[in-house]
Amino acid sequence: MSTGLQKQTETPVEPPRLNRTFWSAPKAPIRIVHLGLGAFHRSHQAWYTQQAGDAADWGIAAFTGRSPDTALALAEQDGLFTLVERTDSNDSFAVIGSIVEAVDGADVATLAVLLASPDTAVVTLTITEAAYLADSDGAFNSNAPDVAADLATLRSNAHPTTPLGRLVLGLAARRAAGGGPLAVVCCDNLSNNGAVARNAVVGMAEAWEPGLAEWISTNTSFVSTSVDRITPRTTAADVAAVEAFCGYRDTSPVVAEPFASWVLSGEFPAGRPRWEDAGALFVADIEPYENRKLWLLNGAHSLLAYAGQLRGHRTVAQALADLACRHAVEAFWDEAEANLPARDLAIPAYREALLARFGNARIAHNLSQVAMDGTTKLRMRAVPVLRAERAAGRPGSGAAVMIAAWMDCTARLPPAQDPLAAEVAAANALAGTARIRALLELVDAGLANDAGAVQLIESLTGTFAEALPLIEPRNRLTSPERTQL
């Protein structure tokens, strides 16, 4: 029997887009300019700036790198985004409002205006290791094609396309405007990264206008840092989780582990936020902290990226759960630890913490992402440890197997992003020892001329096609808890 009533269908109400009504504080004035707007900057430097006790005085204008997409998305949210801190059991959510302007990196005119302003005191960089166009010894590569192209652009009064060229043009505008000194803070994973950034910026300026290079050397402080926070790529599931929990739509959330570390060394002639309020550490000698992070965290990440993909894994957590990969990491860590000063670094505790961080299966850190730019990363993550071990009369197999696994990946897997991709392909056209030497030449010419190192690396190729690891950690048996999965 009909009741005469028709079923009513409800139209779902779309949640509001994240906007300033979800953020009570007024926008801070722009005093920091950032180049390389991406997930890591937002989970790290932007987070530290928001936690500073004087955050109301320090707004960030952040410029993208290769693509404008992140800037366009954030601009629609007035710079706001959600930071999801993810443990192995739950998530917490917080709105970050320290980015007050998000700009397409190609908008060099706006960059120049901001860098010319005396209000701008700090420039931070996350432009990737390869963007500094450095040789294996950290010197600026003035012969790089990107450098030549940008110099031609600068000389024709057009806008450069590389982060270095854009920064140099912006500093030229600051000199012309009498903007005064400022600090450039490198936040990329490079050893002695402040010096590398100085070499790159001054080198580019010297090739364009020597007077500008002299002004930069006198008026710009280049601060070295060690940065640390695992920040995987955001997924559609992450976007949905934010909407479900927070009740608003955020197209650009960032997921990160709860752990964060920032160690800095250098001068800030025009001031800086009180980043120490969020736990940042300011030190006179940063090298031990840099090496601890570059070797133990980044080195292990690269080793897991290459070994894990060869063994069919997708994420860091999956690779770490594989005993072959786990043992290789422990062996590499033993070698790295033997070449780090024990004082103040708490290396055993740092290693244990890394195992917990890497094993967080809810942080989907993709191995293919970590594996990018291998020729650049291996110079800082594997080569120093291998050189130190061989100088001490030890073979350095733990570091060598990382390089060998990278070589295997270049031959067996689809090509990864790399600044020397064409050279890698050419080397892989060779066979046997000639191939090993040619690939090693792209990472470190000195090791390529070391017959013993070449022979060692060649003997370790194919390691991760085997059922069991060929490399056993020296200290594993004296530290049983390290072998528990």
Image (cartoon, rainbow, N blue to C red):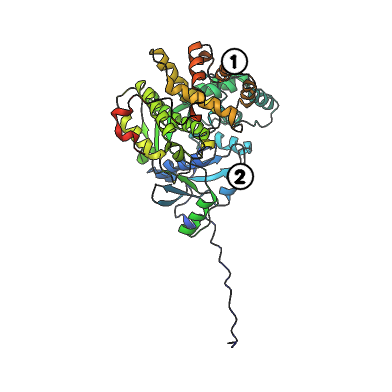
Q: Return the residue nearer the eye: 96 or 171.
A: 96
Callout 1–callout 2 Cβ contact below 8 Å = no
Instruction: Say which label, 1 or 2, has the lower sequence index.
Output: 2
Quarter location, residue 149:
top right
The residue type indicated by label 1 comes to: Ala
| Circle 1 Cα neighbour tier, 10 Å, few/some/many (<14 / 14–19 / ≥20) | some
Residue behind mark 2: 69
Please tell me whether mark 1 sits on a helix, a strand or a loop. helix
Look at 47% across and 30% down and name the residue there.
303
User: How far across and down, in percent of the image, does residue 319 sit?
Assistant: 46, 37
Residue 44 can be seen in this image: no
State the residue position of label 1: 434
Question: Hey, which quadrant is residue 436 in on the image?
Answer: top right
Q: Is residue 47 above or below residue 125?
A: below
Question: Residue 349 at what x, y percent from top left?
Answer: 31, 33
Q: Residue furthest right?
A: 156
Nearest the viewer among 333 and 279 is: 333
Q: Residues within 10 Å of mark 2 (few under 14, many from 20)?
A: few
Q: Residue at x 45, y 49 (%)?
A: 84
Counting from the top left corner in percent of width and height, residue 55 is at: 42, 44
Q: Is residue 33 found left or right of 278 in the rendered image?
A: right
Q: Amino acid at mark 2?
A: Asp
Question: Toward the viewer: 324 or 184?
Answer: 324
Q: Is residue 439 visible?
A: yes
What is the C-alpha distance between the residues marked 1 and 2? 43 Å
